[in-house]
Image (cartoon, rainbow, N blue to C red):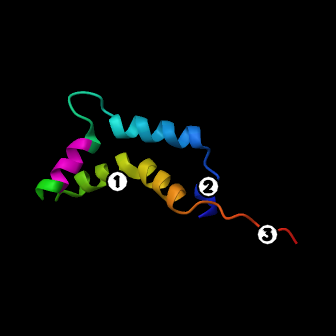
Amino acid sequence: MKWVREIPWPMLLAAAVFLALAPFTPEPHLMEKLRMLAEGSLHRPIDILDLFWHSWPLLLIALRLLFPAREQKAG
């Protein structure tokens, strides 16, 4: 998990916003794929890969928030 904590917050947040909202028109892919998942129509491998691609920065943010860096004890 150390490698996740080494990613700078600004870069991670920028990637999350950009990929979550891309493409901006007519509807972001992440919203479309989440709707398909909720409807049970997310079956094609390309759609599953697209869901993963547009959500990976959000998953990394969740990991950083769920597993914060532990303070090291001195001596």
Q: What element does badge 2 sit on?
A: helix
Q: From the viewer's perspective, is the residue at label 1 or at label 3 nearer?
A: 3
| Callouts 1 and 3 close, C-beta under 8 Å | no
| Badge 2 density bin: few <14, some 14–19, many ≥20, Cα 10 Å | some
Residue in the foreground of this view, choosing between 11 and 62: 62
User: Which residue is at a point 88% across and 72% down the rendered structure image?
Assistant: 75
| Badge 3 density bin: few <14, some 14–19, many ≥20, Cα 10 Å | few
The label shown at residue 5 is 2
Q: Which residues are magenta?
A: 31-37
Which is more N-terminal, label 1 or label 2? Answer: 2
Residue 61 position in % (x across, y down): 49, 51
Residue that mark 1 sits on? 52
Residue 30 position in % (x across, y down): 28, 44
Decide whether residue 36 is among the magenta residues: yes
User: Label 2 to label 3, Cα distance in Å?
Assistant: 18 Å
Which is more N-terminal, label 3 or label 2? Answer: 2
Q: Amino acid at mark 1?
A: Phe
User: Is residue 26 in view?
Assistant: yes
User: Which residue is at a point 34% across and 35% down the rendered structure image?
Assistant: 21
**Up-down relation of residue 23 to residue 41 (above or below):** above
Determine which quarter of the picture holds residue 59. bottom left
Quarter of the picture holding the N terminus = bottom right
User: Label 1 to label 3, Cα distance in Å?
Assistant: 37 Å
Residue 45 position in % (x across, y down): 23, 58
User: Which residue is at a point 39% across and 39% down the rendered structure image?
Assistant: 19
User: Label 2 to label 1, Cα distance in Å?
Assistant: 20 Å
**Up-down relation of residue 25 to residue 3 (above or below):** above
Decide whether residue 16 is among the magenta residues: no
Residue 55 position in % (x across, y down): 37, 49
Left or right position of 13 against 33: right
Q: Residue furthest bottom?
A: 75
